[in-house]
Amino acid sequence: MPDEVLAPNVELFSRNGFAGPNTTIVRAQYRPRFLRARGEYVPRRFHTWDLPAGVFAEPKALPVSILEGEGISFELSRRPAAMSFGYVNVWADELHYIVSGRGELDTEVGTLEVRAGDIVLIPRAVTYRWGEITEEINEYIVVTASELQLDPEGAPGTFNPDLHLDRPVPHGRPGLPVEGEYEVVVRTGDTFTSYFYDVDPIPCLDVVGAPLVLRFNLEHVQGLGVAEGGLAPARLMSSTSGHDFVFGTGSRRSGRPPVHHNADFDEVICYAMGPSPWGSVDTPGTVTWTPKGLLHQGPEEDVQPGYRAFLVETRSTLTMTPAGRDIAHLMETDQYGVHPAEGQTAAAAR
């Protein structure tokens, strides 16, 4: 009986992310489906909703990191009620994604009414707090020492800043005296310092000049489409250092991503909203992490009626924090589901 002829599988080896040289490798075998793995350098998916409520039980609870690297961290926050204090990160920019909820985000340059799907860019040294909350706020926050700037690729086709980008509305009033003292927590890396005032220091009368805090909703971000073949996702933001990039991903007309090695960037994707699943991912707030250099493919993107997600690429080598480890699962790199070997290991341990 003649040997079975196998369809070729194409792999892409890329340097410097989507911008560098690429090498195509053709194999008979499909390699993303590994049987099991031993050790720490493995792809993970994080079920962010599983972080215990007790982590945020204290009214002054601050965001909790699940992944960290040099100059970057990926954090979670849950806010059921208004903050009684101000908060400012003086060493890093913060990109806030509202996974669920609705409320008032008050900053020293004005106020935003935010809802699920909003992305808010808060530069370093801008003080903010959560004001009135009508539905518990669940956030996924990307914290970067590199300055982030909005530079949407393919605009206005993929994203139209003139229509869908807005900034806080100035308060139009001075800060008023408070009973006792008003606290502002200043974050410097993993260290926190409190300053106290006899007036509310956040309100402003007006703001003139370049915008500081920016907000848009992911539902207004469209993917670049092609008639056939794969295409890199559209960039939304980049860091001035070239260290970190943010891409809008979601349902779009394009071929399935190729099997590929991203040799220089860790990839972290947040599934933001449905209704369609993205492969084996269908819950908003699911975060997937593929460390740099690991072979992976990822699910089909051309699905209807659609979904929204965003990808952060970072040159940092990421590691899980203890909180991240508590909600992490071994991930297979074909459809990005929980790897079957995780269940087999658990069963063997019983």
Image (tube, grey):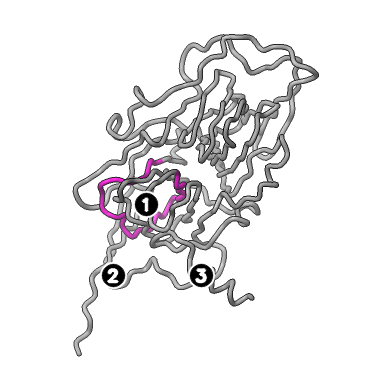
Residue 340 position, x and y percent, is 48, 69
The residue depicted at 58 percent of the width and 48 percent of the height is 68
Using the image, determine if residue 217 lies above or below residue 304: above
**Residue at label 2?**
27
Callout 3: 10 Å neighbours few (<14), some, many (20+)? few
Residue 7 position, x and y percent, is 23, 71
- Disc 1/disc 2 C-alpha distance (Å): 20 Å
Query: Marks 1 and 2: CB-CB under 8 Å?
Result: no
Three-letter amino acid code of the residue under disc 3: Ala
Placement of the N terminus among the 4 image quadrants: bottom left
Three-letter amino acid code of the residue under disc 1: Arg
Point out the stretch of residues depicted in magenta: 247-272
The residue depicted at 57 percent of the width and 57 percent of the height is 328
Residue 288 position, x and y percent, is 48, 53
Residue 302 position, x and y percent, is 29, 50
Circle on res. 37 = 3
Circle on res. 165 = none
Three-letter amino acid code of the residue under disc 2: Arg
The residue depicted at 46 percent of the width and 41 percent of the height is 244
